[in-house]
Image (cartoon, helix red, strand yellow):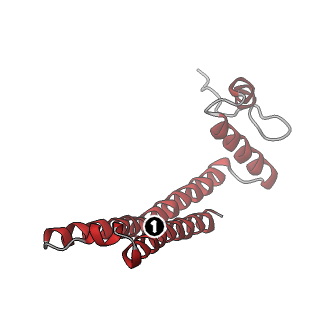
Amino acid sequence: MESPSTEVDRGPSGVPGPLAALAARVGHGPDAAQVAGAIAACRIAHRVGTPLADVLERCASGIVESAEAASARRTALAGPRSTARLLAWLPLAGVLLGTGLGADPLGVLLGGGIGGWCLVLGVGLVVAGRRWVATLVRRAERAGGS
Protein backbone atom coordinates (compact mmCIF):
# COMPACT_ATOMS: atom_id res chain seq x y z
CA MET A 1 0.00 0.00 0.00
CA GLU A 2 1.40 3.37 -1.00
CA SER A 3 1.58 6.18 1.50
CA PRO A 4 -0.14 9.40 0.49
CA SER A 5 2.23 12.02 -0.84
CA THR A 6 2.82 15.04 1.36
CA GLU A 7 4.17 17.00 -1.58
CA VAL A 8 1.80 19.69 -2.88
CA ASP A 9 1.82 20.96 -6.45
CA ARG A 10 3.21 24.45 -6.41
CA GLY A 11 2.82 27.00 -9.15
CA PRO A 12 5.74 28.90 -10.66
CA SER A 13 5.67 31.40 -7.78
CA GLY A 14 5.84 28.66 -5.12
CA VAL A 15 2.21 29.08 -3.99
CA PRO A 16 0.33 25.77 -3.64
CA GLY A 17 -2.71 25.48 -5.89
CA PRO A 18 -5.21 24.99 -3.03
CA LEU A 19 -3.88 28.11 -1.29
CA ALA A 20 -4.22 30.17 -4.47
CA ALA A 21 -7.79 28.88 -4.86
CA LEU A 22 -8.53 29.80 -1.26
CA ALA A 23 -7.21 33.32 -1.86
CA ALA A 24 -9.58 33.68 -4.81
CA ARG A 25 -12.54 32.54 -2.67
CA VAL A 26 -11.67 34.69 0.34
CA GLY A 27 -11.20 37.88 -1.71
CA HIS A 28 -11.31 40.84 0.68
CA GLY A 29 -13.09 39.02 3.51
CA PRO A 30 -12.05 38.87 7.15
CA ASP A 31 -9.50 36.08 6.52
CA ALA A 32 -7.84 37.85 3.59
CA ALA A 33 -4.88 39.08 5.66
CA GLN A 34 -4.04 35.60 6.95
CA VAL A 35 -4.27 34.07 3.47
CA ALA A 36 -2.15 36.89 2.03
CA GLY A 37 0.46 36.26 4.72
CA ALA A 38 0.57 32.55 3.93
CA ILE A 39 0.95 33.30 0.22
CA ALA A 40 3.77 35.76 0.94
CA ALA A 41 5.55 33.16 3.09
CA CYS A 42 5.25 30.58 0.28
CA ARG A 43 6.68 33.02 -2.24
CA ILE A 44 9.59 33.96 0.04
CA ALA A 45 10.40 30.31 0.74
CA HIS A 46 10.28 29.52 -2.98
CA ARG A 47 12.41 32.52 -3.97
CA VAL A 48 15.03 32.01 -1.26
CA GLY A 49 15.00 28.22 -1.50
CA THR A 50 14.46 27.60 2.19
CA PRO A 51 11.93 25.28 3.82
CA LEU A 52 8.56 26.95 4.37
CA ALA A 53 8.58 26.01 8.06
CA ASP A 54 11.63 28.21 8.67
CA VAL A 55 9.98 31.18 6.97
CA LEU A 56 6.74 30.69 8.89
CA GLU A 57 8.62 30.36 12.18
CA ARG A 58 10.42 33.67 11.61
CA CYS A 59 7.20 35.37 10.55
CA ALA A 60 5.46 34.08 13.66
CA SER A 61 8.27 35.29 15.93
CA GLY A 62 8.07 38.73 14.29
CA ILE A 63 4.32 38.87 14.87
CA VAL A 64 4.76 37.82 18.50
CA GLU A 65 7.43 40.49 19.06
CA SER A 66 5.19 43.12 17.49
CA ALA A 67 2.24 42.12 19.69
CA GLU A 68 4.43 42.19 22.81
CA ALA A 69 5.72 45.66 21.92
CA ALA A 70 2.17 46.93 21.37
CA SER A 71 1.13 45.50 24.74
CA ALA A 72 4.12 47.11 26.45
CA ARG A 73 3.23 50.46 24.82
CA ARG A 74 -0.37 50.24 26.03
CA THR A 75 0.86 49.43 29.54
CA ALA A 76 3.39 52.28 29.53
CA LEU A 77 0.80 54.80 28.32
CA ALA A 78 -1.85 53.75 30.84
CA GLY A 79 -0.07 55.74 33.58
CA PRO A 80 -0.08 59.11 31.79
CA ARG A 81 -3.71 58.62 30.74
CA SER A 82 -4.80 57.83 34.30
CA THR A 83 -2.79 60.70 35.73
CA ALA A 84 -4.35 63.17 33.29
CA ARG A 85 -7.82 61.91 34.17
CA LEU A 86 -7.12 62.26 37.90
CA LEU A 87 -5.63 65.74 37.55
CA ALA A 88 -8.66 66.89 35.57
CA TRP A 89 -10.94 66.02 38.52
CA LEU A 90 -8.75 67.59 41.23
CA PRO A 91 -10.09 71.16 40.85
CA LEU A 92 -13.63 69.89 41.44
CA ALA A 93 -12.39 67.97 44.46
CA GLY A 94 -10.76 71.18 45.75
CA VAL A 95 -14.02 73.09 45.40
CA LEU A 96 -15.91 70.32 47.24
CA LEU A 97 -13.26 70.18 49.97
CA GLY A 98 -13.35 73.96 50.39
CA THR A 99 -17.14 73.87 50.65
CA GLY A 100 -16.90 71.05 53.17
CA LEU A 101 -14.51 73.09 55.31
CA GLY A 102 -16.95 75.99 55.42
CA ALA A 103 -15.41 78.26 52.80
CA ASP A 104 -17.38 79.52 49.80
CA PRO A 105 -15.20 78.68 46.77
CA LEU A 106 -18.19 78.67 44.40
CA GLY A 107 -19.19 82.13 45.57
CA VAL A 108 -15.68 83.40 44.98
CA LEU A 109 -15.34 81.74 41.55
CA LEU A 110 -18.79 82.75 40.31
CA GLY A 111 -18.89 86.15 42.03
CA GLY A 112 -16.85 87.92 39.37
CA GLY A 113 -13.66 89.88 39.80
CA ILE A 114 -10.48 87.99 40.42
CA GLY A 115 -12.39 84.80 41.31
CA GLY A 116 -14.00 84.78 37.86
CA TRP A 117 -10.62 85.23 36.23
CA CYS A 118 -9.25 82.37 38.31
CA LEU A 119 -12.15 80.17 37.18
CA VAL A 120 -11.59 81.00 33.49
CA LEU A 121 -7.84 80.53 33.80
CA GLY A 122 -8.28 77.24 35.71
CA VAL A 123 -10.72 75.79 33.19
CA GLY A 124 -8.44 76.88 30.34
CA LEU A 125 -5.42 75.25 31.96
CA VAL A 126 -7.31 72.01 32.63
CA VAL A 127 -8.47 71.85 28.99
CA ALA A 128 -4.97 72.70 27.72
CA GLY A 129 -3.43 70.06 29.98
CA ARG A 130 -5.84 67.37 28.80
CA ARG A 131 -5.15 68.20 25.16
CA TRP A 132 -1.41 68.29 25.74
CA VAL A 133 -1.40 64.85 27.38
CA ALA A 134 -3.65 63.46 24.63
CA THR A 135 -1.24 64.81 22.00
CA LEU A 136 1.77 63.32 23.78
CA VAL A 137 0.06 59.93 24.08
CA ARG A 138 -0.94 59.99 20.39
CA ARG A 139 2.64 60.83 19.37
CA ALA A 140 4.01 58.05 21.54
CA GLU A 141 1.55 55.56 20.03
CA ARG A 142 2.44 56.66 16.49
CA ALA A 143 6.19 56.54 17.20
CA GLY A 144 5.88 53.05 18.63
CA GLY A 145 3.71 51.82 15.79
CA SER A 146 6.17 52.70 13.04
Q: Quadrant of residue 138?
A: bottom right
Residue drawn at x 74%, y 33% as measured from the top left: 16
Horizontal placement of 109 versus 58: left or right?
left
Quarter of the N terminus within the rendering:
top right
Pointer 1 residue: 77
Residue 34's image quarter?
top right
Looking at the picture, which amino acid does disc 1 mark? Leu
**Residue 49 drawn at (x, y percent):** 77, 53
Q: Position of residue 57 (x, y in %)?
A: 58, 54
- Quadrant where the C terminus sits is bottom right
Image: 61 above or below 26: below
Q: Nearer the viewer, residue 15 or 146?
A: 146
> Alpha-carbon neighbours of circle 1 within 10 Å: few (<14), some, or many (≥20)?
some
Give coordinates of residue 69: x percent, y percent: 51, 64
Q: Is residue 38 left or right of residue 99?
A: right
Name of the residue lying farthest toward the left: 101
Name the one closer to the observer, 23 or 80. Answer: 80
Q: What is the residue that sits farthest to the bottom in this orientation?
A: 114
At a point 72% along the width and 40% down the height, the residue shown is 39
Q: Nearer the viewer, residue 41 or 79?
A: 79
Q: How many marks?
A: 1
In the rendered structure, the answer to whether residue 69 lies left or right of residue 55 reads left
The vertical placement of 144 against 50, above or below, is below
Please say if 71 is above or below 27.
below
Residue sitting at x 62%, y 33%: 31
